[in-house]
Image (cartoon, rainbow, N blue to C red):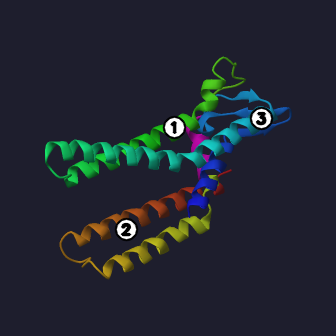
């Protein structure tokens, strides 16, 4: 599962580099103004991104252990035990660090190419929407309701989905299915348009 996510992340990063006749055009997040780069520059950006993203779980685990150790020392010195709110706060800080490091890796080409002139305009919202919908496949659209159904079935083994807070799972599942179906309908509509 982790390898699949890493591959998806790397592919999404590499998709920012659009091949052209003499190299590539870099568009930040597939929508920024196009900046020309050579094939070697593109390959270097992708290699560095891949290397740093592979190291990220190790760095996050080390940071998390250091943070937990510091919290244990702090709570131990005060004579109190670590409560649930402290544990949640540590988890939130670790997630923030992971997202910040990923964002830093993602925007490395922006920092490196800051002085280079763009050769065109940024994509409009309509073009970005069309590109994003083109990347979604129909098996993904129709697979989402199946996955939600399986998830709800698994949850129903330990939670009553028809009473109390269990109904929240049904609402969240319904929203996920509706979102997937709306995306599928939008994809179908855009593909039919001339």
Q: Which residue is pictured at 63% across the width and 47% down the height?
A: 12
Crowdedness near tag 2: few (<14), some (14–19) or many (≥20) residues, C-alpha within 10 Å: some
If you read the primary sequence from the N terminus, does the residue marked by circle 2 or circle 1 appear first?
A: 1
Report how far apart the C-alphas of labels 3 and 1 lie in the structure: 22 Å
Decide whether residue 191 is among the magenta residues. Answer: no
Foreground disc of the pair 2, 1: 1
Q: Where is residue 95 in the image (x, y as percent from the top left)?
A: 40, 46
- Residue 110 lies left or right of residue 81; in this view the side is right
SS label for mark 2:
helix
Q: Can residue 190 be seen in this view?
A: no
The quadrant the N terminus occupies is bottom right
If you read the primary sequence from the N terminus, does the residue marked by circle 3 or circle 1 appear first?
A: 3
- Residue 145 lies left or right of residue 105; in this view the side is left
Quadrant of residue 74 within the rendered picture: top left
Foreground disc of the pair 3, 1: 1
Mark seen at residue 173 = 2
Count of picture labels: 3
Q: Give the magenta part as a residue range.
A: 124-133
Q: Position of residue 170 (x, y in %)?
A: 31, 70
SS label for mark 1:
helix
If you read the primary sequence from the N terminus, does the residue marked by circle 2 or circle 3 appear first?
A: 3
Q: Position of residue 34 (x, y in %)?
A: 69, 29
Foreground disc of the pair 2, 3: 3
Task: State the residue position of label 3.
Answer: 24
Report how far apart the C-alphas of labels 2 and 3 lie in the structure: 41 Å
Report how far apart the C-alphas of labels 2 and 1 lie in the structure: 29 Å
Q: Could you tell me if the residues under marks 3 and 1 are in contact, i.e. CB atoms within 8 Å?
A: no
Nearer the observer, 125 or 28 = 28
Task: State the residue position of label 1.
Answer: 103
Decide whether residue 125 is among the magenta residues. Answer: yes
Q: Is residue 22 above or below residue 11?
A: above
- Residue 133 lies left or right of residue 84; in this view the side is right
């Amino acid at each position: 599962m982790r390898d699949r996510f890493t591959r998806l992340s790397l592919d999404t990063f590499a998709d920012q580099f659009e091949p052209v006749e003499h190299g590539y055009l870099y568009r930040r997040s597939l929508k920024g103004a196009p900046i020309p780069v050579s094939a070697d520059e593109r390959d270097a950006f992708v290699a560095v991104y891949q290397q740093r993203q592979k190291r990220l779980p190790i760095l996050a685990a080390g940071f998390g252990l250091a943070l937990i150790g510091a919290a244990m020392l702090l709570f131990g010195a005060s004579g109190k035990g670590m409560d649930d709110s402290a544990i949640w706060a540590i988890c939130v800080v670790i997630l923030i660090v992971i997202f910040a490091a990923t964002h830093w890796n993602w925007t490395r080409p922006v920092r490196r190419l800051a002085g280079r002139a763009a050769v065109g305009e940024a994509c409009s919202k309509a073009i970005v929407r069309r590109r994003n919908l083109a990347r979604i496949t129909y098996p993904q659209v129709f697979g989402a309701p199946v996955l939600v159904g399986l998830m709800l079935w698994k949850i129903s083994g330990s939670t009553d989905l028809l009473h109390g807070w269990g109904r929240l799972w049904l609402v969240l599942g319904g929203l996920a299915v509706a979102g997937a179906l709306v995306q599928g309908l939008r994809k179908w509509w855009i593909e039919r348009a001339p």
